[in-house]
Amino acid sequence: MLPFITHTAQSQQTTRIEGMVSNALGQALPYTNVFISDLGIGSVGDANGYFRLEKVPIGTHIVTVTSLGFKTASRTIKVGKDAIKGLNFRLEEDTEDLEEVVVLGKSDASKLQESAQAVTVVTTETVKLQTADLGEIMAKTEGVSVQRGGGLGSNARFALGGLSGDQVRFFYNGVPLDFSPYAFGLANVPVNAIERVEVYKGVVPIQFGADALGGAVNLVPPQTNKKLGGSVSYQTGSFGTHRATANLEHYNEDSGFFASFGGFYDYTDNNYKIDVVVPNELGQLEQFEVERFHDAYRAFGANFTIGLRNKKWAKELSLEGYYGDYDNEIQNSQAPGLINEPQLGINNAVAGSPFGEVVFTSFSTGANLHYNLELGKKWAIDLRGGYNYNERESLDVGNNLYNWFGEVVRIQNQPGEFGPADNLITKSENVFARQQVTFEISKGHSLNLSLAPTYGLRTGDDLLIDGPFDPALDEGRLFDFVSGLEYQAELFNEKLENVAFVKNYRQNVRIESLDPSVDQVLVDERSVSEFGAGNGLRYEWSERFSTKLSYEFAYRLPRLDEIFGDGQFIQENLELRPENSHNINLQWDYTGRETSKVQWQLQGNFFLRRVDDLIFLLVNADEFGSFQNVWSATSEGVEFGGSISNIIKGLTLSANTTYQDYRNTSDTGPFTAFRGDRIPNVPYFFVNGAVEYGFESLFRKGDDLSLFWNLRHVGAFFVGWESAGLQQFKAEVPDQTVQNAGVTYRMELGKLQNSITLEGQNLANAKVFDFFGVQRPGRAVFVKLTTQF
């Protein structure tokens, strides 16, 4: 290893050198070694490829850059009294002798992958140039299922190990996703706004202050560490789709001041073609291909961050503000039905009636404050807090009934397409705080204390009800307090890492409602307190092979909507108990020799989730219902994945598969008769595969062209209980295989890194149903332009 010893130069006049290091594709190379060997001056670049050499004497020097797997690059420069900026290097791959290069640092993603946490890290460095959104990218990750009720902007159900919905918690840079401009769902988040995604499976670290059963997902935005940098992207294509993002950042190292701005805009008509069944003139069902006509989606949002870093009194102090807004036309219910009668010429065609005027809208705004302080070498304090206001409106007051051709076929006496007329506004105010205190007991041993209170106030207004007796006006107050204490130890030269923790989950519920029978405000309240615990263990058997074993007994506290209902068809239930689960993961990771020309990696995970007091919406014959603790279930399965590159130079192959057996184990309640059945409407087998081939310096020095293809297969699964009724008459979501392919061309113009991507999605025009009777888009073509600087 080359020792870097920075010393004071003999010359009286010195200056500094700054620059960036990237690979031949123009992608930033993190943590490269940059040095001037004859002076003993050196540094390690940061996560974004930026480096800085201080106190460089005036004169002529040779600057050298090295990085594992790349050829060493050197450049002779003449240094004057003025600082040199923009000294950029592009390193070429070295597939012949990797042993001569040494890396002195690791990225945050690598450190996290190598920790004792049950986590998978998905980086977006390459995929952010492609046209897939975050939901499609996450669906390619082992253990992850993303079901969507249509195209861009549609409802999505994200699942880990079979557990979904509120059983999985979502975060943006360590704070709840609700306190961000992306509060409308993870699947529709622009990829260009995210640097990496951390997927915690089953076991959730205490620093998130979260209650969860299935795990947690943390979206990490790009870090602000450039003097001036950013990116702009624009995508357009099929179904009237337009997506734009912009990010701008500034950092002044001398003053420690930093600022960033981000924004996005999405629009689509979602007028893709689907197969439907419609009665013909004789009243017989007949299959037609039609365009969806009331499914447009529009969303936009913006956020800013300002702050200071590396002060004696604060490692970081920052303020973030954000706003997000969306409008969504609703074409159909979540499960309109599906008919497959080949003898009648009907092949998996959507049944039911469409909607022509139902609309959902929402906006969210708020601010977050972050303060981080290191007290000496032993103590560190991290404080976060925020406020959020969210308002949602559902509008269904039309008297018209539509057919799939967009025609009005009947005018009703009573308004409402979805059901009874609806114009409900739901308002939520939320405040959260996160406090983490870390104490280093000795080298390799530390204690972490996490305190995470969250307060929510929910009320509303049913605009179709006149007078004071509006159930939507009831005020529901929810106070959650999740606290945790963690002990972390590294032993045997960091080969063994163990993280043990305990958590307390506390919830106070209070609802104030006006009772029309007595004309007074009634108050009802209750509180619960539960304890959980867990442990994460990682052992590095060799430089290439490591295993992780993690366990947590966890609770998931009921949410506002589950406890307080919706003020209309879902009634309140203050007796709702928290869900709980035993979560176990056994992970392993094997990497090929670093000195080999062919690079490959294999990883796997065996998991078990044993869940009790699961919360389920029970609806009666009058279409009114409430959330109840009604069943228990067990999910067990296996995940396996791997990748290999440079079998042929520039070629990378990767694949993963997941099998999960998620079954009902209830011995009491309404679902006892289906004990042993798979949980309905949940996929249990899926496979992903990808191929990428790159050409370097194809048309000019420094440019590149990459071809990519990927495939996703999901096996068929039943919509209802397996043991209910005859199999030939069961509603089933058919198996499906979707293929995407595209080409990306990248080139550098000065300091601008530009790319253009042409991508085809669902190339075979397969019929895709994530939910029964809700057909997803067929073949589509998109173009995306991206500029980074």
Image (tube, rainbow, N blue to C red):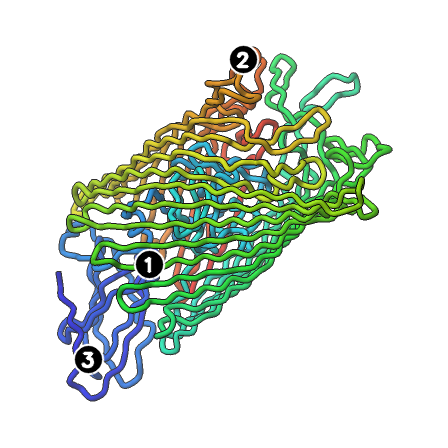
For label 1, count other residues whose C-alpha is less than 10 Å away and answer few (under 14), some (14-19) or many (20+). some
Label of residue 438 in the image: 1
Q: Earlier in the sequence, mark 2 or mark 3?
A: 3
Q: At which x and y percent is residue 16? A: 28, 78
Q: At which x and y percent is residue 420? A: 77, 35
Q: Please, is residue 496 above or below residue 31 in the view? A: above
Of circles 3 and 1, which is in front? 1
Q: Nearer the viewer, residue 255 or 474?
A: 474
Give the image quarter of residue 530.
top left
Disc 2, SS: helix
* Distance from Cα at disc 3 to Cα at disc 1: 46 Å
**Residue lying at 53% horizontally and 57% vertically, measured from the top left:** 245
For label 2, count other residues whose C-alpha is less than 10 Å away and answer few (under 14), some (14-19) or many (20+). few
Residue 290, can we see it? yes
Of circles 2 and 3, which is in front? 2
Q: Which residue is mark 3?
A: 60
Q: Which residue is mark 2?
A: 727
Q: Earlier in the sequence, mark 2 or mark 1?
A: 1
Q: Which part of the image, by quadrant, shows the N terminus?
A: bottom left
Q: Nearer the viewer, residue 573 or 358?
A: 573
Q: Nearer the viewer, residue 704 or 506?
A: 506
- Residue type, label 1: Thr
Disc 1, SS: strand
Seen as rendered, the residue at the extreme bottom is 12
**Is the residue under label 1 in contact with that under label 3 (CB below 8 Å)?**
no
Of circles 2 and 1, which is in front? 1
Q: At which x and y percent is residue 158? A: 49, 38
- Residue type, label 3: Thr
Give the image quarter of residue 316.
bottom left
Q: Earlier in the sequence, mark 3 or mark 1?
A: 3
Residue 325, can we see it? no
- Residue type, label 2: Gln
